[in-house]
């Protein structure tokens, strides 16, 4: 049986019209029986959809049906000899290109190289280790690579977004935790603020006699000022460094705290002198000098020393809850002034919308810097809670703070700090929340009452 020839409407050689059943072209004599059958039609494949590539024949090497080449036709041209435009195909990947600037290359099928001069495009073979197919395993990211908190697979780009799912990543300061021996601190952005403007520092050193000294510093950036996050960070770091330098040299802890607050104030003041930084940081914020509050505590040689400027607070909570807790600081605030002057009760003052207007802070535009320090000698073990108003707004009275603080906070300070921050978030989290938990142990030889 004679094989059926493909039905052509025009001669492949000279393009003259053909009659049905012609074996040769009447114009040029082209042998129509030599024309190969047209390839089977393949449906269009949607871009980005997975493709099951057919196995490439050994001779062709492309793995795809080759189009029939007519006699006299130049590869890369149409039947009239015109150059065909190159079309780039974009595949997902960091090096994929598309558009008029995309560079064509040789075609490739997984496991095979494209023939030289084929004019096709090179397609990278998929890595089975990254695909998760056929027993493949996800590639181990390089050391130090930050993974997305949402999909746990994509890498985070320098702008803070996942390269895989596009999810915005939490900033480093949105939630911070640190535990150092017998002191721990936790800071959280809260539920209403767009960034965390609090900061903290915890550390330990030794006095000249070799006994330990443990330090906790907490700072709250003033939101109405320029760059409050930078102010709190600079203050906490500078105060901590000052204490680490002074205490081993024999400076009394209370004097060391006073000097540390002055060092923190100087660091915050220097931020206002940096040209062009404030407007560049936030062009919509008023150009008030960077500012923050500070509260710190030192446990050393049987002493508990606190220092502060502003309305961040320190609380004392004894391990034996039968003893009374106490607030160790007095706010530099409008409400505190009204109470001290006898003009309002504490409940009335703190219910006023002006209650949290501070009258003392660290910053170049502070009216007068008055570091407050106090020294205590507790006669029983307990815990010092050093915190910003983001916490004490939800546990203002010492009794309230003692009720929220876990009973085992002295042995598990990080857990205690986490519970306190969680309490503030559960209460509404209207502000940044930062707290340090610093246990106090009575020295073996005993100590007098405060």
Image (tube, rainbow, N blue to C red):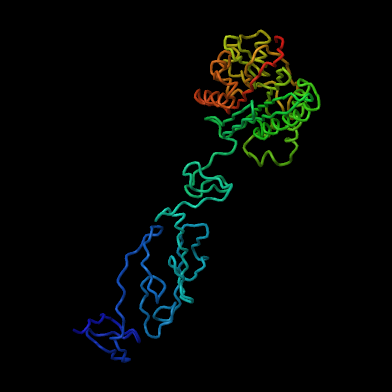
Instruction: Give residue 3's quadrant in the image.
Output: bottom left
Instruction: Give residue 37's quadrant in the image.
Output: bottom left
Tell me which residue sits at (31%, 81%) in the image.
36
**Depth check: 345 or 42 in front?**
42
Measuring from the top left, give residue 334's x and y in whole percent: 65, 17
**Depth check: 227 or 67 in front?**
67
Q: Residue furthest front?
A: 444
Q: Residue furthest left?
A: 1
Taking the image as shown, residue 178 lies to the left or right of residue 58, namely right
Q: Residue furthest top?
A: 342
**Quarter in which the N terminus is drawn:** bottom left
Figure disc tally: 0
Position above or below: 303 against 117: above
Visible residue check, residue 308:
no
Measuring from the top left, give residue 292's x and y in whole percent: 68, 28
Taking the image as shown, residue 330 lies to the left or right of residue 7, namely right
Measuring from the top left, give residue 229's x and y in whole percent: 64, 34
Visible residue check, residue 70:
yes
Tell me which residue sits at (77%, 26%) in the image.
247
Taking the image as shown, residue 348 lies to the left or right of residue 237, namely left
Measuring from the top left, give residue 66's x and y in whole percent: 37, 75
**Quarter in which the C terminus is drawn:** top right
Instruction: Give residue 189's quadrant in the image.
Output: top right
Position above or below: 81 against 369: below
Position above or below: 85 against 11: above
């Amino acid at each position: 049986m004679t094989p059926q020839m493909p039905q052509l409407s025009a001669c492949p050689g000279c393009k003259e019209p053909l009659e049905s059943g012609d074996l040769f072209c009447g114009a040029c004599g082209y042998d129509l029986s030599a024309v190969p059958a047209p390839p089977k039609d393949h449906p269009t494949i949607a871009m980005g959809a997975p493709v099951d590539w057919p196995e490439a024949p050994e001779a062709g090497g492309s793995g795809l049906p080759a189009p029939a080449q007519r006699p006299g036709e130049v590869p890369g041209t149409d039947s009239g000899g015109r150059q065909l435009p190159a079309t780039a195909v974009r595949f997902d990947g960091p090096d994929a290109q598309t558009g008029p600037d995309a560079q064509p290359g040789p075609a490739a099928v997984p496991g095979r190289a494209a023939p030289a001069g084929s004019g096709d495009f090179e397609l990278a073979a998929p890595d089975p280790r990254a695909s998760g197919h056929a027993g493949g395993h996800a590639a181990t990211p390089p050391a130090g690579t930050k993974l997305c908190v949402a999909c746990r697979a994509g890498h985070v780009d320098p702008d803070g977004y996942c390269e895989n799912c596009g999810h915005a990543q939490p900033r480093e300061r949105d939630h911070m935790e640190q535990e150092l021996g017998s002191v721990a601190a936790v800071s959280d952005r809260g539920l209403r603020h767009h960034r965390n403007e609090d900061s903290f520092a915890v550390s330990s050193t030794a006095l000249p006699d070799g006994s330990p000294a443990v330090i906790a510093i907490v700072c709250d950036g003033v939101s109405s000022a320029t760059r409050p996050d930078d102010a709190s960070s600079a203050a906490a770091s500078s105060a901590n460094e000052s204490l680490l330098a002074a205490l081993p040299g024999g400076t009394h802890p209370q004097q060391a705290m006073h000097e540390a607050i002055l060092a923190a104030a100087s660091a915050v003041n220097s931020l206002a002198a940096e040209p062009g930084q404030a407007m560049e940081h936030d062009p919509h914020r008023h150009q008030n000098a960077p500012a923050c509050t500070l509260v710190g505590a030192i446990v050393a040689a049987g002493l508990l020393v606190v220092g502060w400027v502003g309305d961040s607070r320190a609380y004392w909570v004894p391990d034996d809850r039968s003893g009374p807790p106490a607030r160790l600081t007095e706010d530099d605030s409008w409400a505190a002034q009204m109470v001290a002057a006898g003009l309002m009760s504490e409940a009335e003052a703190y219910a006023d919308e002006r209650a949290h207007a501070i009258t003392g802070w660290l910053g170049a535009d502070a009216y007068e810097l008055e570091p407050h320090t106090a020294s205590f000698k507790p006669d029983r073990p307990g815990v010092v809670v050093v915190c910003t108003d983001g916490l004490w707004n939800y546990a203002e009275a010492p009794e309230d703070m003692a009720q929220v603080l876990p009973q085992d906070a002295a042995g598990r300070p990080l857990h205690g700090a986490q519970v306190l921050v969680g309490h503030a978030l559960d209460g509404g989290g209207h502000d940044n929340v930062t707290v340090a938990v610093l246990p106090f142990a009575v020295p073996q030889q005993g100590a007098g009452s405060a």
